[in-house]
Amino acid sequence: MKLLNDWRITILLCLTLGLAPFFPEPHIVGKLKWLAGGANGMTAKDYFDVLLHGFPFILLIRLIFVKIKK
């Protein structure tokens, strides 16, 4: 549980796994644009990719919520 509540690891995950690859735009940004545009042609692999790259940000939001709640 200590690992999930560590700010440094969560930020590191967001900056590496969450945003990789960085050029020409972060991968998660392109996938979110695709989802916002109706997700035409997305397969199960693409949804898993969104989950994989989005999970560090879900951890960050959870951590912020836990810290505010205290």
Image: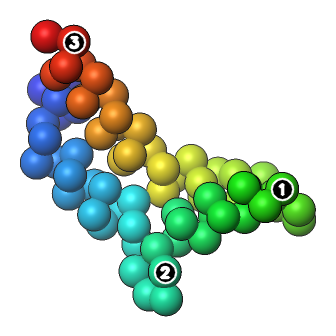
Residue at figure coordinates x 83%, y 56% from the top left: 38
Q: Which residue is mark 2?
A: 25
**Marks 1 and 2, how far apart at CA:** 20 Å
Relative to 55, 9 lies left or right: left
Q: Which residue is mark 1?
A: 38
Tell me, yes or no, if residue 50 can be seen here: yes
Question: Which residue appears farthest toward the right when viewing the image?
Answer: 41
Residue contact at pointers 3 and 1, CB within 8 angstroms: no
Badge number at residue 48: none
Q: Which quarter of the rendering shows the N terminus?
A: top left
Question: Which residue appears farthest toward the top when viewing the image?
Answer: 70
**Marks 2 and 3, how far apart at CA:** 34 Å
Task: Kindly indicate the quadrant of the structure image that contains residue 34.
Answer: bottom right
Q: Which residue is mark 3?
A: 69
Q: In the image, what residue type sits under mark 1?
A: Gly
Q: Position of residue 30 (x, y in %)?
A: 60, 70
Q: Position of residue 7 (x, y in %)?
A: 13, 41
Tell me, yes or no, if residue 45 can be seen here: no
**Marks 3 and 1, how far apart at CA:** 35 Å
Residue at figure coordinates x 39%, y 67% from the top left: 19
Relative to 54, 3 lies left or right: left
Residue contact at pointers 1 and 2, CB within 8 angstroms: no
Secondary structure of the residue carrying numbered label 1:
loop
Q: In the image, what residue type sits under mark 3?
A: Lys
Residue at figure coordinates x 78%, y 53% from the top left: 44
Q: In the image, what residue type sits under mark 2?
A: Glu
Relative to 15, 50 lies left or right: right
Disc 1 crowd rating (10 Å Cα; few below 14, some 14-19, many 20+) is few
Q: Is residue 11 above or below residue 23?
A: above
Question: Which residue appears farthest toward the bottom when viewing the image?
Answer: 24
